[in-house]
Image (cartoon, rainbow, N blue to C red):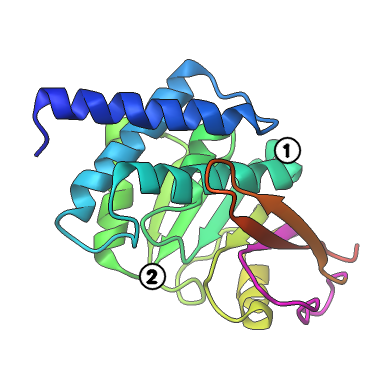
Amino acid sequence: MQDGDAREESEVAVFAILEQGFDSLPISPALEQLNQLVALVLLLEAWAGKINLTGHRDAAAMTRGLVLDAAALAAALPELADARTAADLGTGAGFPGIPLAILFPATEFFLVDSRKKRNHFQREVRRRLSLGNVRPMLGRSDRIEQRPCDLVLAQAMAQPAEALVLMSQWAGRSGLLALPGSEASVPPDVPAGYREAELRRYRVPESGTERRLWVVTKDL
């Protein structure tokens, strides 16, 4: 456990990284949201010391590699602002879903993962941060009750074509599929009834990491 001074130093450092990062994004979170994101990082850091939740090992790396990564994704996906429901399949410890739920409190996020420890962490975050719009769900996305959503995310869940099929099972009538992080240089095969995938590129602030995002819409 961190002592009071060390925790305060971490809070200040994480807050500063977030402020700098959001300065270069078209997203302006409220102070309460920034404080929630700081609390998320510190909680993740505390848990990661006990169980394997992420490859990032300190608060600064978690802030840049997970929280600002999610924020940059949101900037590349303006459709999030209009989504009433969203699913994050294979969410792991809750990324990018939890940061997005903090930034978009009017959207209900279903966080799907088959590993109990990660589900427990998601539930603890929901309780500690009072995130009423977060719905942790334990199990494989194709074996649990599926909720039709306006937007479906899956980051590093499977090969692009396979992931899109699994994602389509969670899509509502006009559901949009968003597959971040794929290195595929050509559009992945899409499920029947969907249009060809659109490639969007974005950069994560503070780390400078370049990302790709495949966006697939239904052929209505």
**Can you tell which quarter of the image residue 48 is in?**
bottom left
Q: Between marks 2 and 1, how big is the CA–CA gap?
A: 27 Å
Residue 29 - label: none
Looking at the rendering, the stretch of residues picked out in magenta corresponds to 173-195
Identity of the residue drawn at 67% across and 53% down: 151
Q: Position of residue 167 (x, y in %)?
A: 63, 69
Secondary structure category for the residue under label 1: helix
**Residue closer to the observer: 193 or 8:** 8
- Magenta span contains residue 76: no
Q: Position of residue 65 (x, y in %)?
A: 46, 51
**Residue under numbered circle 1:** 82
Identity of the residue drawn at 60% across and 81% down: 159
Q: Quadrant of the C terminus?
A: bottom right
**Residue under numbered circle 2:** 139
Q: Residues within 10 Å of mark 2 (few under 14, many from 20)?
A: some
Q: Residue furthest right?
A: 220
In this rendering, is residue 13 above or below 78? above
Prevailing secondary structure class for the magenta stretch in the rendered image: loop
